[in-house]
Image (spheres, rainbow, N blue to C red):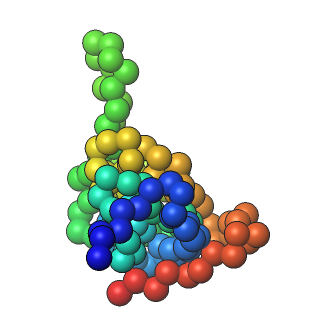
């Protein structure tokens, strides 16, 4: 019996919904990264992009535990001298919770081209409504 190797021709992609309301940001991001990578499937292949589509709703209701709201920063640099921009997560979660969730998921994916294509299948919404009803997404019930 030969070993099954997934490739573009034999991968079936499903759509899943993750509800981030009143759940830790990291737990939701970890579940999303697992689904995007395809590690929940029995035919998972590490060198192939065999993940599913993920919709995260209620990103603004995700919680950060401990003192992360005041001690954690989102940092970016323009590349110029003095070009460091810092934003506290308290501000980031109020103004752009979708970005905070996307950054958390991005950090949990491998740093390669598979992760880049996996992030294109991630959709994050601030509120509980999304526009992907035509794809018939299933609700992912993580532990």
Occupied quadrant, residue 113: top left
Q: Nearer the viewer, residue 139 or 93?
A: 139
The total of numbered circles placed on residues is 0
Residue 74: x %, y % from top left? 33, 43
- Asked whether, in this view, residue 137 is left or right of residue 114, the answer is right
Task: List the single residue furthest toward the front.
Answer: 1
Given residues 70 and 59, the one toward you in this image is 59
Residue 3 image-quadrant placement: bottom left
Quarter of the figure with the C terminus: bottom left
Residue 131 in sight: yes
Please tell me which residue is depicted at 51% across the width and 63% down the height of the picture.
10
Q: Residue at x 63, y 75 (%)?
A: 137
Q: Is residue 16 left or right of residue 119?
A: right
- Image quadrant holding the N terminus, namely bottom left
Q: Residue at x 53, y 49 (%)?
A: 120
The vertical placement of 88 against 136, above or below, is above
Above or below: residue 94 compared with residue 11 = above
Q: Position of residue 141 (x, y in %)?
A: 46, 85
Identify whether 34 is placed above or below 124. Answer: below
Q: Residue furthest right?
A: 134
Question: Residue visible at 32% across and 17% down?
Answer: 79
In percent of width and height, residue 24 lies at 35, 72
In this orientation, does residue 25 appear? Answer: no
- Rendering coords of residue 65 (x, y %): 28, 70
Q: Is residue 42 left or right of residue 17?
A: left
Quadrant in which residue 27 is drawn: bottom left
């Amino acid at each position: 019996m030969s070993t099954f190797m997934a490739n573009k021709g034999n991968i079936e992609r499903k759509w899943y919904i993750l509800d981030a309301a009143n759940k830790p940001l990291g737990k939701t991001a970890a579940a999303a990264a697992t689904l995007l990578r395809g590690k929940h499937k029995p035919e998972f292949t590490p060198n192939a992009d065999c993940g599913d589509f993920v919709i995260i709703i209620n990103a603004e209701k995700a919680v950060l535990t401990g003192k992360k709201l005041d001690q954690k920063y989102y940092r970016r640099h323009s590349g110029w001298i003095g070009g460091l921009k810092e934003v506290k997560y308290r501000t980031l979660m109020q103004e752009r919770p979708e970005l905070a969730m996307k950054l958390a998921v991005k950090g949990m994916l491998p740093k390669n081209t598979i992760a880049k294509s996996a992030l294109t299948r991630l959709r994050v919404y601030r509120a509980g409504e999304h526009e992907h009803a035509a794809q018939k997404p299933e609700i992912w019930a993580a532990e």
